[in-house]
Structure formats: C-alpha cells, structure tokens
Image (cartoon, grey):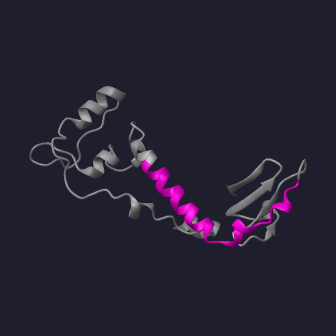
C-alpha cells in the first residue's frame, strides 16, 4: 500500500481476481514431486490433506508463499493478465487516452502526460505517465 501511495497510483488488488478456489486439488499428492523432478526444484507440501493432496493455493504458489515461485509460468500468466486488465481499466477510465495525436514530436524527444492528460516534465513526475513520441504511444512508470 505504501508504494501505491508513494507513486500516487491506485493499488492493484490482484489477489481479488485470481479465482483460486479454497480447498484441496483431488489426486494432487504427486504434483510437487513431479514439478521438482521436471524443474529441479525442491518444493515441499505445505498443509497437505490426509491423502497428501495440495491446496489450489500451493499449486499457484509452490513454495507456499510466492506466486512467482511457479516454474511452469502459469502463475505469471494469470497475474500478468490480471494486472494488464486492471491497468487497462484504470487507463481507459482517465483523460490520458484523450491526448491529441498532433502532440507527437516526430524526430524529437518524447512528451509526457499524466493520467489526466496534462503535459508534464517526466523528470519531475512520479507515477504512471503516457509517453508520446515519433515511435508511438506507451505507458511508463517513473
């Protein structure tokens, strides 16, 4: 939350959009050992059920804590999609998308706009910015 406040950007509460169900995955008692063998990892089951099955959360976070510990990339894809959708939602609900195309500086340095579409000096501004230049438009975090 502090980082969100520091940069003046909304908190992306991605955990609310993962759709990870509660409970255990049926017949998953060998999932971690197979994952360890395939990727050379050493994950251990955290709170298995009586049959050794792991939770849906542990499949998402094999180390029991971090989603990016998943060597298959599935957790990364889920979080990337969620983050992209949340950022797109934030950006399309602001005036920043209305930055006029005639402000593109062909052959010159880029111009920067805040989330309200107001031109800013990028060196003095923190947070999400819209950069327009001769190579097109992109979103940047400063």
Residue 13: x and y, percent?
A: 46, 65
Single out the residue that lies furthest toward the front: 101
Describe residue 108's horizontal placement relative to residue 64 as left or right: right
122 to the left or right of 42: right
Residue 77 vs residue 129: left or right?
Answer: left
Res. 87 image quadrant: bottom right
Q: Is residue 139 magenta?
A: no
- Give residue 43's quadrant in the image: top left
Q: Is residue 70 left or right of residue 141?
A: left
Looking at the picture, how far across and down is residue 80, in whole percent? 49, 50
Q: Which residue is drawn at the image coordinates 83% and 54% (left, top)?
A: 110
Our reading of the magenta stretch's main secondary structure is helix
Q: Which residues are magenta?
A: 78-105
Residue that appears at 40% across and 61% down = 17
Q: How many marks?
A: 0
Above or below 67: residue 35: above
- Give the residue displayed 65% in from the left and 72% down from the top: 94
Return the x and y of residue 10 as percentages of the image width and height: 56, 69
* Residue 77 placement (x, y as % from top left): 45, 46
Seen as rendered, the residue at the extreme right is 107
Placement of the C terminus among the 4 image quadrants: bottom right
Magenta-span inclusion, residue 93 = yes
Q: Residue at x 42, y 40 (%)?
A: 73
């Amino acid at each position: 939350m502090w980082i969100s406040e520091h940069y003046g950007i909304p908190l992306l509460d991605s955990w609310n959009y993962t759709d990870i169900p509660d409970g255990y995955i049926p017949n998953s008692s060998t999932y971690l050992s197979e994952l360890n063998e395939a990727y050379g990892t050493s994950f251990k089951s955290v709170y298995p059920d009586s049959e050794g099955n792991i939770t849906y959360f542990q499949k998402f976070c094999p180390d029991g804590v971090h989603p990016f510990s998943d060597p298959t990339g599935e957790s990364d894809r889920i979080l990337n999609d969620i983050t992209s959708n949340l950022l797109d939602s934030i950006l399309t609900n602001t005036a920043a998308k209305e930055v006029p195309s005639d402000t593109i500086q062909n052959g010159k340095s880029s111009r920067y706009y805040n989330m309200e579409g107001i031109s800013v000096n990028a060196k003095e501004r923190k947070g999400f910015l819209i950069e327009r230049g001769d190579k097109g438009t992109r979103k940047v975090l400063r």
